[in-house]
Amino acid sequence: MKSYTITVNGNVYDVTVEEKNEAGAASAPAAAPKAAPKAPKAPAPKKTQGAGSIRVEAGAAGKVFKIEASVGQKVKRGEPVVIIEAMKMEIPVVAPEDGTVASIELAVGDACEAGTLLATLN
């Protein structure tokens, strides 16, 4: 058996693969694998000067598909601010409350994880 550590979308998995000889019989088991080291955390997004106090964060990992609002624009609760593309679906990220867009933190095409700061409102 061989043991591998695989990282998929920032998640670390320990995988054990059984080797077979040419006749199809399994080879003798090997010693138990050691625990895999954890992947380093992704760096926190950059803070923008003059950012607002209301955070608009990504609910899922994906990439920024479209920016619906611009800095200085007034938005109402539930209006889309940014659209994320995840698993071939467009997911609107909406304003959590009424306010004015203070900053847009990412550009179209930028990758993001769940919880990434996308924009701020005042």
Image: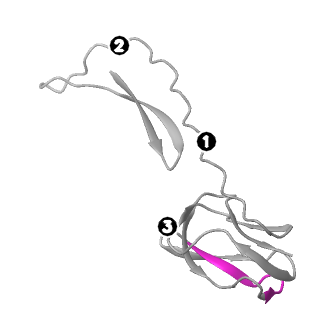
Label 1 sits on a secondary structure element that is: loop
Kind of residue sitting beneath label 3:
Met
Closest to the camera, between mark 3 and mark 1, is: 1
Give the residues in magenta.
74-84
Specify the quadrant of the image occupied by residue 2. top left
CB under 8 Å between callouts 1 and 2?
no
C-alpha separation, residue under disc 2 versus residue under disc 3: 38 Å
**What residue do we see at 56% from left, 32% from top?**
38
Kind of residue sitting beneath label 1:
Lys
Q: Is residue 72 above or below residue 55?
A: below
Specify the quadrant of the image occupied by residue 20. top left
**What residue do we see at 50% from left, 26% from top?**
36
Kind of residue sitting beneath label 2:
Ala
| Quadrant that contains the N terminus | top left
Label 3 sits on a secondary structure element that is: loop
**Where in the figure is residue 81, as x and y percent of width and height?**
70, 80
Numbered badge on residue 87: 3
Dot 1 or dot 2, earlier in sequence: 2
Relative to 85, is 103 on the left or the right?
Answer: right
- Magenta highlight: main SS: strand
Closest to the camera, between mark 2 and mark 3, is: 3
